[in-house]
Image: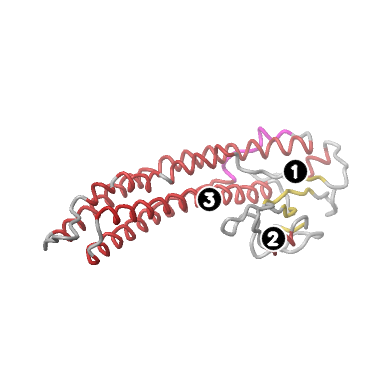
């Protein structure tokens, strides 16, 4: 349900020149919970390396050995795929919890800035599509990670067979590759948490009739220069929003890969000027 937070604030007597609501950052526990879901897949591949290597015979190789190895790898992949599909339940629970935490932090931020408690106004209805889209994206990303590990494991094993590489060296390469995939999964999970919160920022602000935001740079060590230049500037969520404010940038805060920038809500008065 949409509402006009600026009008509510003015009725409550808020007369400040500009009202800014503190930015929302994901809590570490939210990030860690998603990471714990993502690493299930690479951890299962790690646990099955010994099993995958059992048919490996690079020296006295038989005609059936490559076929046996291919069957084992594919069987492991199918077993892990079933687990990955079931992770959708955990992802759904995570996304619900993350949205609730974001909603509570948004409520607290609005209360601190305006003394207005939105507890009876806010719900999950206005952000259901946003949460559903992010949930579907995470399901797909975990599937992609599983398929990528499957392809790389298959390649490593059969290259080893062709080159007659000792089993211990192939097993070591497998562990290194799975470890790399695990690190990637952890990073992707952190990035996806940021993306969910960035999408919720926009949905919640627009639900409250807030058309403008201030770009807050993440202060990361290797930032995008264009994001540094946007820091502190006020933008519109939609080009049709009233002035002041710059037109929407090509990418919103937190939307590009590994971007940690945030959108700080700015409330404008009914006359279109900062409160």
Sequence-wise first label, 1 or 2: 1
Residue 97 appears at what percent x and percent y? 53, 37
Query: Where is mark 2, residue-wise?
Result: 227
Check the image and report above or below for 100 versus 254.
above
The residue carrying mark 3 is 192
- The secondary element bearing badge 2 is classed as helix
Q: Which mark is residue 21?
A: 1
Q: Which circle, 2 or 3, is nearer the viewer?
A: 2
Labels 3 & 1 near each other (Cβ < 8 A) = no
The question of residue 119 being in magenta is answered with yes
Residue numbers of the magenta segment: 117-126
Q: Position of residue 141 (x, y in %)?
A: 44, 54
Mark nearest the camera among 3 and 1 is: 3
Q: Position of residue 273 (x, y in %)?
A: 85, 53
- The CA span between labels 3 and 1 is 23 Å
Nearest the viewer among 246 and 11 is 246
Question: In the rendered view, does 212 fall on the left or right side of 51?
Answer: right
Tag in front: 1 or 2: 2
C-alpha span from label 1 to label 2? 20 Å
Q: Is residue 8 above or below residue 266?
A: above
User: Could you tell me which residue is drawn at 69 percent across and 60 percent down?
Assistant: 227
Tell me which secondary structure the magenta stretch mostly adopts. loop
């Amino acid at each position: 349900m949409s509402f006009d937070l600026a009008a509510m604030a003015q009725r409550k007597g808020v007369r400040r020149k500009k009202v800014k609501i503190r930015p929302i950052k994901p809590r570490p526990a939210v990030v860690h919970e998603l990471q714990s879901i993502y690493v299930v897949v690479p951890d299962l591949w790690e646990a099955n390396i010994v099993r995958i290597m059992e048919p490996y015979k690079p020296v006295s190789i038989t005609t059936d050995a490559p076929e046996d190895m291919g069957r084992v790898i594919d069987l492991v992949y199918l077993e892990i795929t079933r687990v990955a599909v079931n992770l959708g339940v955990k992802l759904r629970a995570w996304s619900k919890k993350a949205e609730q935490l974001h909603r509570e932090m948004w409520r607290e931020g609005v209360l601190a800035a305006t003394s207005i408690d939105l507890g009876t106004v806010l719900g999950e209805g206005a952000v259901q599509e946003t949460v559903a889209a992010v949930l579907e994206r995470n399901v797909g990303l975990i599937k992609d990670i599983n398929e990528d590990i499957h392809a790389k494991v298959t390649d490593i094993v059969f290259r080893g067979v062709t080159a007659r590489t000792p089993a211990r060296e192939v097993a070591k390469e497998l562990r290194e590759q799975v470890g790399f995939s695990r690190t990637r999964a952890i990073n992707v999970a952190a990035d996806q948490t940021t993306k969910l919160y960035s999408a919720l920022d926009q949905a919640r602000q627009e639900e409250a009739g807030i058309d403008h935001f201030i770009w807050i740079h993440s202060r990361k060590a290797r930032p995008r220069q264009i994001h540094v230049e946007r820091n502190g500037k006020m933008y519109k969520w939609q080009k049709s929003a009233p002035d002041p404010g710059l037109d929407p940038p090509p990418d919103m805060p937190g939307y590009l890969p590994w971007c940690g920038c945030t959108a700080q809500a700015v409330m404008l008065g009914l006359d279109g000027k900062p409160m």
